[in-house]
Every structure is written in structure tokens, then in C-alpha cells.
Image (cartoon, rainbow, N blue to C red):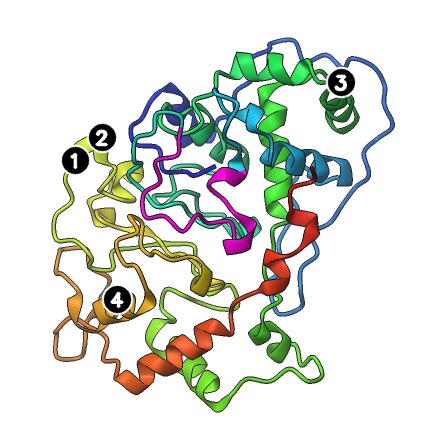
Amino acid sequence: MNGKYAVLHLSALMLLSGTVISCKKDHRPVENFPAPTPARLEVPGNLPKVADDADNPLSAEGIELGRILFYDARLSGNNKLSCASCHRQDIAFSDATALTSIGVSAKPLHRHTPTLFNLAWAKSGLFWDGGSKNLESQALGPLTSEDEMHQDLYELERELKAVPDYVKRFKLVFNREITSTDVLKALAQFQRTLISAGSRYDLYIRKVPGATLSSQELQGLALVHAKCGSCHQGELFTDYSYHNNGIDAIFPDDLEGIYQGRYRVSFDLADMGKFKTPSLRNVMLTAPYMHDGRFINLDQVLDHYRSGITYSATVDRALYQNDGNLGIPISQAEKAAIKAFLSALTDDAFTKNKKFSNPN
């Protein structure tokens, strides 16, 4: 589920409106099954509380169904790609590629694969431009994009209905025959459980016995709060909002505005060139960086913020110094401290958690 679709098509237009479609008009329950087992998100104490989704309540069976679907190549038109093809658990559900070309068309995409963790808190839109309102509609874009999974939703329903285990699981979770709507709901349930908060930093903050940070890491933490905290806020290390961080001066309207960021969705000129703030959690695992993967390492990222910011009318005000010049002063020692702290945000427990792994 890459979320890097290149052009708007019917599915994407419906996705932008937050609409989830189904291929069947008849959603009558097929027979009575025991009610699925209610589930709650396991939220560590240092993360904010998150409300349950009333429109798609979690169940143990729904989460497991979503996990199975996430790793199933039947979701692609050529039956060769799963969501996990571009979202690898070992690297925090990213793909280590600037612009992947493993989609059905084999054409490079136009945006870098976003990570998939702590999305239960992402209430201001998904994708780099916020083009999807929620996790239920998010999967529709990559599923149907010609350059990604290129699946026909009628065909997907047909294929899944031919698998007795899927028929049983969908009946148990949703008490009806398989629909594309419920495929999206199951995927969303699984993705909401992808919570990353088990790094050395988290253990230190939660005062777990024996958990420590070095003096350099603590210095880096203070620097991140002081120099990066306007966007990478709080315990989630993101504000889930949109900012122009000065990596481009012009924003062409090629490919129906794919390079224009949030403006592509809002049509507000104040949003021109603004892209979603990624979390700093697991950032050591998720190179390359930025919405197009242009920076191959964190040294390049930090050098950009120090001296590489390009002016445009919507550049974020936090990137201006008191004298009006652009850039965030960062010494070499400060850069080393920031990188040391960011290493402490790597969550090995998350990347190895068998609850999120391929069930097969």
C-alpha cells in the first residue's frame, strides 16, 4: 500500500472524498455467526490516548484477517505483489527505495513509500499530501493504481470468494459475503495496531528499570525539541500536518499536481509545496528521505536544514532565523548528537513483533 499513485483516476477521486466503494449492492448477511471478539489498541503510557473508530470497530478476528490480506499477493492484479512488497516490517514498513518500480507497470512511482506505524493518530489525512481521509479509503489508491497493484475490485472479490478460509473469516468478522469495502476495513484494522513505542527512548521515558540514554543522546533529544520540534512534535515525533520545508522553489502542475503537495488536495495556495511531516521514530531504518526520497542519509537531511533551504512563498516560518535568513544553525557536534538520539528511536521490538509478521 504505497500511497504514491501518480495521477488521479476514478478510484483516487473517490479516495480523496473519503469514499469507500464496494462492488456489490447486496450486502445482506449470509448467515448468523458468533460475534467477533472486541479488541482495543495497546497504547503505551507515553503515547497520547486515541479514540476507537466507531465506523470500523476493532476485533481480534478483523485484525488477523487484515494481517493475512496485507501479506496476500492476490490483492494485486498480477498476483505477485502484496502490501508487504513495499512495506517491509524489518525497516518499519518502508521499502529502502527512493521511487520504487516494482509495481505491476514496472514504472518508477513519483513519491517515496511512506512508513506504516502509529497511523491510528493520523486524523488529518494520509499519503504525503493528505489525499485520503482515513485508513479505510487509503488502501483504495494503491490497490487500483495501474502503476502499483492494478487490481480490479470485482476480480479481487471473485478471487477471495474462491478461498474457503477467506469466506469463513469474512463471515465471522462482518457477517456477510466478501466485499471490497470489507477488504479495506480489515486492512485498516490491522494497520491501526501497528504501534511503535518500544525504542530505548521509550523505555527511558517510561522509567523501565535499567533503561538509560547516554549524555550525547540526551543532548540530541534536547536539540530535536529545540530545532525540530515545531513539526516533529510530542511523543509521536510528528504533528501529522503539512509543511513546505524548502526543498524546492517551484512546484510544477505535471501529473495533475503530484509535485504541488497539499495544494493538490486543498486548492489553497497557502498549501503549495507542503507535504506531510513523517515521524522521526525508526528514522534510522527508513532512508532515503523526503516525499521523493532525494536524500540518501541523515547527514544530507541535516545539511539541507542547515544551509540548503530554498525560498518559496510558503516556506515554513520555523525555518527562518531571527535575521530573516533561511536555515537552522546546526554545528557538527550538534549533528552528531541529533543522530545519536535518533538512533535511540529505533524500535527493534516493533520490527520483530510476530503479531505484525507474515502469518504464512
Q: Position of residue 1 (x, y in %)?
A: 48, 37
Instruction: Identify the element where label 1 is drawn.
Output: loop
Q: Residue at x 12, y 79 (%)?
A: 323
Q: Which residue is mark 2?
A: 256
Magenta-highlighted residues: 84-103
Q: Residue at x 36, y 79 (%)?
A: 226
Residue 55 visible: no
Mark 1 crowdedness (10 Å alpha carbons): few <14, some 14-19, many ≥20: few
Q: Residue at x 46, y 60 (%)?
A: 285
The reply to whether dot 1 and dot 2 touch (C-beta < 8 Å) is yes
Q: In the image, 175: left or right of 266?
A: right
Q: CA distance from mark 1 to mark 4?
A: 27 Å
Q: Amino acid under label 1? A: Asp
Q: In the image, 61: left or right of 250?
A: right
First along the sequence among labels 4 and 2:
2
Q: Amino acid under label 2? A: Glu
Q: Residue furthest bottom?
A: 215
Q: Which residue is mark 1?
A: 253
Q: Which residue is mark 3?
A: 164
Q: Nearer the viewer, residue 91 or 179?
A: 91
First along the sequence among labels 1 and 3:
3
Mark 2 crowdedness (10 Å alpha carbons): few <14, some 14-19, many ≥20: few
Q: Amino acid under label 4? A: Gln
First along the sequence among labels 4 and 3:
3
User: On the rendered image, what quadrant is the C terminus found in?
Assistant: top right
First along the sequence among labels 2 and 3:
3
Q: CA distance from mark 4 to mark 3?
A: 50 Å
Instruction: Identify the element where label 4 is drawn.
Output: helix
